[in-house]
Image: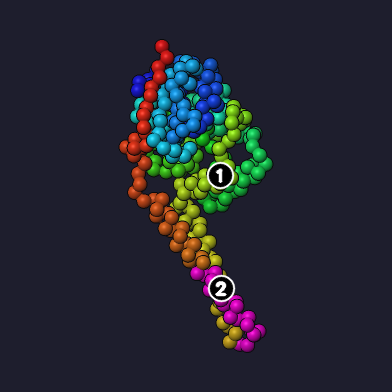
Amino acid sequence: MKLKNYKQLIVVPVYEDRQAATRLFGEIAALYGRDAFLLAVDDGSVREPIDEAALRTAKLDGAIIRLRRNVGHQKAIAIGLSYLSQYVHHGQAIIVMDSDGEDLPASIAQLVTALDDAQVDIAVAQRRRRVETLKFKGAYVLYKMLFKLLTGRNINFGNFMAMKAAGLRRLAAMQELPLHLAATALVSKLRIKPIIIDRGPRYAGRSKMNFVGLVLHAFRALMVFAEDVLVRVGILCALIATLSVLFAMLAVILKLIGFATPGWFSVALGVLIIIFLQTGALALMTLILTGIVRSDNTAGTIVFSEFIDTVSEIKND
């Protein structure tokens, strides 16, 4: 693909959301016209696959990557970014946004403007107002608190972001990218600038992100920081194990000097031994999971090409 003449390269994952995506394409075309190139990644849609007509109707230049199967939102984004990294040029802004309209096309300009700063590699949308249920908002707050506790970092942004060409190439080379885009941006050491942006309402349909999906999303973010989590969990397990050994020794001493009531010693010692074994098992499981995540399973364009069925380029003359 020849992309040198475009200022904004926009990656949009789409899954069974043709109506909302078609409206999004039209609004992007109306705002940015010939300066924008849109790469839609159809994540294995069966009922509502995105087609070339959506881009042609909007008179928007772009391409559609159709995946052989549904791989999930984050991996679809990773495939799109990895594919685009082969064609990007210096000076272009690469934008990632969802297809449902909650990421407002008008906000792209704010993110791209932030990239004019030489000290900024990625501009991310930090939400000032969210349009979700109270249950979802509560779960999202809990997710951020858990992430902060286990990694020591704040994660207060999602997929809506703009990055420079060098930032794209760096992210595309990172094996963590298919797990979680935002967490990978944090671990990449790239310079991130948050921009306060409101979240819009969906154009059509219902959100496919439910409570279970949010929990899985949170665990994938933690997997990106597997080593940090291992250290913190290991320290906690070592502390609890040490305390259980000390209390067990205290229970033995009390038994020997006759201060233990009948049945108290066996119950206390049994509970402390169980706590000790459980902390050891937790530390071992965390170590094993870290090894799996950090195994040599390199993500890149060669691996991602296995998921791509077809690529259709649309040029509106």
Q: Which residue is farthest top?
A: 317
Q: At which x and y percent is residue 86?
A: 34, 29
Name the quadrant containing residue 88.
top left
Q: Mark 2 points at which residue?
A: 272
Q: Which residue is drawn at 41% across and 11% down?
A: 317
Left or right: where 169 falls relative to 236: left
Q: Is residue 285 above or below residue 198?
A: below
Q: Is residue 111 found inside the magenta-colored segment of the image?
A: no
Q: At which x and y percent is residue 233?
A: 51, 58
Q: Give the range drawn in magenta.
A: 257-277
Quarter of the image where the N terminus is located: top left
Q: Which of the two labelled residues, at mark 1 and mark 2, occupies the earlier sequence position?
A: 1
Q: What element carries label 1?
A: helix
Of 20 and 114, the residue lying toward us: 20
Q: Is mark 2 on a helix, strand or loop?
A: helix
Name the quadrant containing residue 61.
top left
Q: At which x and y percent is residue 29?
A: 50, 18
- Give the alpha-carbon distance from disc 1 to disc 2, as whole Å: 35 Å
Of 162 and 15, the residue lying toward us: 15
Amino acid type at image mark 2 = Leu
Left or right: where 301 falls relative to 130: left
Q: At which x and y percent is residue 315?
A: 40, 17
Q: Mark 1 points at which residue?
A: 214
Of 193 and 311, the residue lying toward us: 311
Residue 154 in view, yes or no: no
